[in-house]
Amino acid sequence: MEEIKNYIDNIYPMNSAEWDFFSSKLFRETVNKNSTLIKVGVVENYLSFIAEGIVRIFIPQEDSDLTFGFVFENEFVTAYDSFITQTPSHYQIETLTNTTLWRISFEDLQAVYKNNKSGNLIGRKMAENMFLIKSKREISLLNKSAEQRYLDLFLERPNLLKHIPLKYIASYIGVTPQALSRIRKRIT
């Protein structure tokens, strides 16, 4: 639980009473590699902090999934649009490695927002961060080549790419696995 406390303290430290209330709402869950956290058509009910592991966000398709996000240790993951609107998700989230999560339900998070002064500020800061990540991804897709998107991913998370199958990386940067193979060959 220390990981999530450190993460939150970097945003805005909670006093001990607020932390005690918030942490009492968290529960730890360990899930195996290739486990589904949320399916298309299901309402997201959890905001999860990844203490250990890697997850993938994707739209399932008949021939090949469309991967549009990876989330790593010490980051939050959720089908956020489904979570905040309490409507069915349009995409899925699955673990790529054995993963340990600290989770809070939608209802419990609402109680934290209601009872903790710092809860709303932290929630707003986290939502702003999620927006910035999404915006950076969209701008990257519009302004950068597939090769540059691969290099950016490689530079940001070099050791974690070892755990992500190349077909998912190819989908994430918007190319076929064969095109990714050519990009990797050019780079090396």
Image: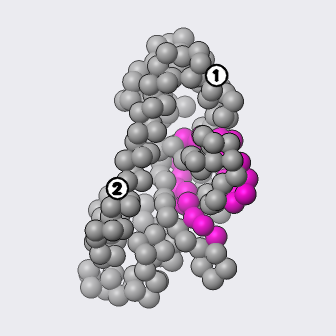
Residue depicted at x 38% and y 59%: 137
First to last magenta residue range: 37-60
Q: Position of residue 184 (x, y in %)?
A: 33, 81
In the depicted structure, whether residue 132 falls above or below residue 91? above
Left/right placement of residue 186 relative to residue 99 reads left
Residue shown at 33% from the left, 61% from the top? 139
Label 1 neighbourhood size at 10 Å, few (<14), some (14-19), many (20+)? some
User: Distance of mark 2 from mark 1, alpha carbons?
Assistant: 31 Å
Q: Given the current orientation, which residue lies at the most extreme right position?
A: 42
Q: Amino acid at mark 2?
A: Lys
Q: What SS does tag 1 mark?
A: helix
Q: What percent of the width, then of the height, locates residue 133? A: 39, 51
Q: Quadrant of the C terminus?
A: bottom left
- Nearest the camera: 10 or 1? 10
- Which comes before the other along the chain, label 2 or label 1? 1
Amino acid type assigned to the residue bearing label 1 in the image: Ala
Q: Is residue 35 above or below residue 4?
A: below
Which residue matches tag 1? 111
Quadrant position of residue 158 = bottom left
Give residue 154's position: percent from left, percent from top.
Answer: 33, 66
Image disc number at residue 80: none
Q: Report if residue 39 lies within the magenta region.
A: yes
Could you say whether the residue bearing mark 2 is in a helix, strand or loop? helix
Q: Is residue 16 positioned above or below 102 on the image?
A: above
Is 82 included in the stretch rendered in magenta?
A: no
Residue marked by disc 2? 136
Residue 70 on image: x %, y %? 48, 59
Residue plotted at (62% across, 60% down): 91
